[in-house]
Image (cartoon, rainbow, N blue to C red):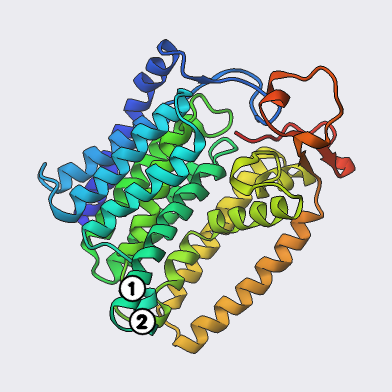
């Protein structure tokens, strides 16, 4: 516990202090996110904040390990560093989004599998090499899915940083309760780094983490979910814990995937103002209220994850069934709230178009309450 507090303090101080020079560097390099139809901000905001998060977390982890990243830690940091670099290149406009989704994220997942970090979900039910192969495939899907979920969740000031901080807190607590030293160390480092950055990113944001920060945090959350093993939870129910801790990004990704697919759009290539936070903001909570609501939801999911260790397998699956039903109801309710609905380009009328329209999808207003809203997506 004492070592974890030191790790947290180092990450917090490093991220808090390093974000300031990183912001100045982003301005010098002209790495800024400019206002646009799908953005929440009205003035240019520096990117590159992910570098401050990364440095804070890595410095704390290295200190806790005596400066020698060995074994699985080396592979974890290698995967995180890869995504940080790819994210910076993407923030710079030098990469196509498909490179991140279909190359960088799977490669980061492979670094984990190569180090022996993988899911054991399928092999719990399917024995032999078939179960192992399917577990590896599920591991890659989990890493890509969670990393991408954090990437697309980054659309309001303080949202990803706060959700990552809450999730890493519960990962760390669960790890301490079940004797998982490595997971506790990583969770403490990410918690401190996220909170340090949040000082500069909460509305009104002075810097954005960019894709570099969102993908790094998403990858680390996916890794914590794979590494966490609860001693008092049956093997068949182990998967429920990380899914609950990461419930907010998983739900938001599910919502936009269903909503966009029903409108004939490709979920991960059709950005817009149709995320959970946008809909809550348009319904009257405004940006700050929407973000705080999702903080509360993330904390609730975390407490439910703590509860799982005291339940039987049957009770765990009953909880999953109840939450799945509630999530379905939430999707239906949120789909009825006002939000901006992207229209496929072929449906647009001919005539002069802005650069944003020419580059991809445009939007139509869904719900009368949306008019005048300042919500957006990054």
Quarter of the view holding residue 199: top left
- Vertical placement of 47 versus 286: above or below? above
The reply to whether discs 1 and 2 touch (Cβ–Cβ < 8 Å) is yes
Percent from the top left, x then y, of residue 277? Answer: 66, 46
Q: Nearer the viewer, residue 157 or 325?
A: 325
Residue 363 left/right relative to 235: right
Q: Residues within 10 Å of mark 1 (few under 14, many from 20)?
A: many
172, above or below 375, in the image: below
Q: Quadrant of the N terminus?
A: bottom left
Instruction: Residue 35: give x, y in percent of width and height.
Output: 64, 21
- At 56% from the left edge and 45% from the top edge, which residue is drawn? 153
**Residue drawn at point x = 16 percent, y = 47 percent:** 64
Q: Is disc 2 surrounded by few (<14), some (14 to 19) or many (20+) residues within 10 Å?
A: some
What residue appears at the point 67 percent right and 70 percent down from the top-left corner?
326
Occupied quadrant, residue 364: top right
Q: Secondary structure at mark 1?
A: loop
| Residue 56 image position (x, y, % from top left) | 29, 36
Task: Give the Cα separation between the discs numbered 1 and 2.
Answer: 6 Å
Badge number at residue 124: 2
The residue at which mark 1 appears reads as 120
Locate the C terminus and report the quarter of the image it occupies: top right
């Amino acid at each position: 516990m004492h070592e974890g507090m030191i790790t947290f303090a180092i990450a917090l101080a490093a991220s808090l202090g390093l974000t300031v020079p990183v912001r100045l560097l982003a301005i010098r390099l002209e790495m800024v996110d400019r206002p646009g139809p799908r953005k929440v901000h009205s003035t240019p905001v520096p990117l590159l904040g992910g570098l401050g998060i990364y440095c804070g977390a890595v410095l704390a982890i290295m200190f806790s390990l005596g400066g020698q990243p060995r074994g699985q830690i080396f592979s974890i940091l290698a995967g995180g560093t890869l995504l940080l670099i790819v994210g910076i290149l993407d923030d710079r406009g030098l990469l196509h989004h498909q490179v991140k989704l279909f190359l960088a994220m799977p490669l980061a997942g492979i670094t984990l599998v190569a180090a022996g970090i993988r899911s054991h979900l399928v092999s719990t039910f399917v024995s032999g090499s078939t179960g192992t192969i399917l577990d590896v495939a599920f591991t890659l899907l989990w890493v890509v899915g969670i990393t991408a979920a954090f990437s697309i969740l980054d659309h309001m000031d303080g949202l990803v940083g706060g959700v990552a901080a809450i999730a890493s807190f519960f990962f760390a607590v669960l790890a301490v309760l079940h004797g998982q030293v490595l997971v506790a160390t990583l969770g403490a480092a990410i918690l401190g780094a996220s909170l340090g950055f949040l000082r500069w990113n909460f509305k009104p944001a002075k810097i954005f983490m960019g894709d570099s920060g969102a993908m790094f945090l998403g990858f680390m959350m996916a890794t914590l979910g794979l590494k966490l093993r609860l001693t008092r939870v049956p093997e068949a129910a182990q998967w429920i814990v990380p899914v609950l801790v990461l419930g907010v990004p998983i739900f938001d990704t599910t919502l936009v995937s269903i909503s966009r697919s029903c409108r004939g759009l490709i979920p991960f290539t059709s950005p817009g103002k149709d995320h959970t936070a946008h809909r809550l903001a348009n319904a009257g909570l405004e940006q700050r209220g929407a973000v705080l609501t999702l903080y509360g939801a993330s904390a609730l999911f975390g407490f439910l994850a703590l509860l799982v260790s005291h339940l039987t397998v049957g009770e765990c699956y009953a909880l999953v069934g109840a939450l799945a039903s509630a999530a379905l109801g939430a999707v239906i309710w949120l789909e009825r709230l006002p939000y901006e609905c992207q229209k496929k380009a072929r449906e647009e009328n001919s005539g002069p178009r802005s650069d944003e329209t020419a580059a991809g999808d445009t939007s139509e207003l869904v719900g009368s309450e949306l008019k005048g809203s300042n919500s957006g997506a990054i």
